[in-house]
Image (cartoon, grey):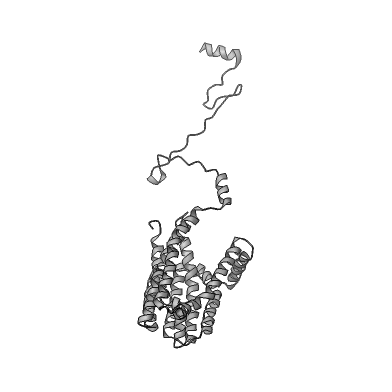
Amino acid sequence: MRNVPRSLLWVTLGMIVANLAGEMYYPILPLYLESLGATVQEVGVFFTLQVVLAICFRILGGWISDHMGRLPTIALGSIFGMGAITGYTLAPTWEWAALGALMAAVGSSLVGPSFQAFIAEQAPEGRMSSTFGLINGLFLICAVIGPPVGGYMADHVGFKTMMWVATAIFYSATAMRVWMAWGSRFEVKDLQPSQLARDMRVTLGLLVGGGVLTWLFLIDGLSDAGNQVAFPFLPKYITQIRDMPKTTYGILMALTSLVSALAMWPCGRLAGRWRSPHHRACRRRRTPAPRPRPCRRDPCSGCRPRRPPPPPVHWRPAPGAAPPDGRPAPRHGSAGRRAAASR
């Protein structure tokens, strides 16, 4: 924690507050849609629409983050999130709630990539994996607190009151994000659609190239597909078929997030220390450069650094040549010895 920059901690705090509001209603959102008159099939259509919108806007959100800056993009996405949660709260039917899903997809597409990129940029050198594990572990605090609170309020005071409380919490998080982005450097670069198309071609080439990124994409995609098949109908299964209160479902979700939060930081440290065999072989072949000896007269102290001594000059005069100081050239042979004896 001491090595994590303060700006990253403030951004993480804003993310925790904002997602605390989201975790209050999102795990029981299928039940809320049913209270608005949606059938089981319509709930599936709603979440399918949500995933399609996320696919359409996520790449665009990362591209905008590269051109606007991380904190301004997070603030802009939070403003769209305000519209989304307000649309959920005021929606009279599930069709009107779909408009909130549209704004939620835009907001999450702006905030999600910007936050992850901000972690990578602010992480201390050599500690990126552990920083990711620590920040994402702290980030899961909202997923531990939010579901039990949302389930309890939905059981005792109703969905609408719970949604208004979550809306107030999200509004405060938006004010915090806008305040953080207000003092940051805001510089909008030229947004060229041709550059976006070129970046998309490069990204698609990496995904279908058959390397490690392709396999990670396939594994993560299959995992998300399985979650999307089960998640929209899991609250109905637990609360109605198994006849459990919404509070119990929230506690189950909180326990799942707690296990993930406790495992996140150790796994991040393990990922930072566990290198691939190729990387270890490269490190064994690498010869460390000699460390320079510290100079007594440091340039930062205001003194002049000590100059190295000039290399020695070995001068051997040729026969009859004068030395550099102008003295007569020594005589060689017997004549030289007699001249030296006469002196």
Q: Position of residue 319 (x, y in %)?
A: 61, 21
Left or right relative to 41: residue 130: left
Specify the farthest residue to the front.
242
Tell me what residue is drawn at x 58 percent, y 73 percent: 193
Q: Position of residue 141 (x, y in %)?
A: 40, 67
Q: Is residue 293 visible?
A: yes
Tell me what residue is drawn at x 51 percent, y 82 percent: 43
| Frontmost residue, 158 versus 193 | 158
| Frontmost residue, 91 versus 122 | 91
Left or right relative to 143: residue 195: right
Q: Position of residue 269 (x, y in %)?
A: 46, 56
Q: Is residue 184 visible?
A: no
Q: Is residue 86 above or below residue 124?
A: below
Q: Quarter-wise, where is residue 92 in the image? A: bottom left
Give the position of the N terminus as an image quadrant: bottom left
Q: Position of residue 312 (x, y in %)?
A: 52, 30
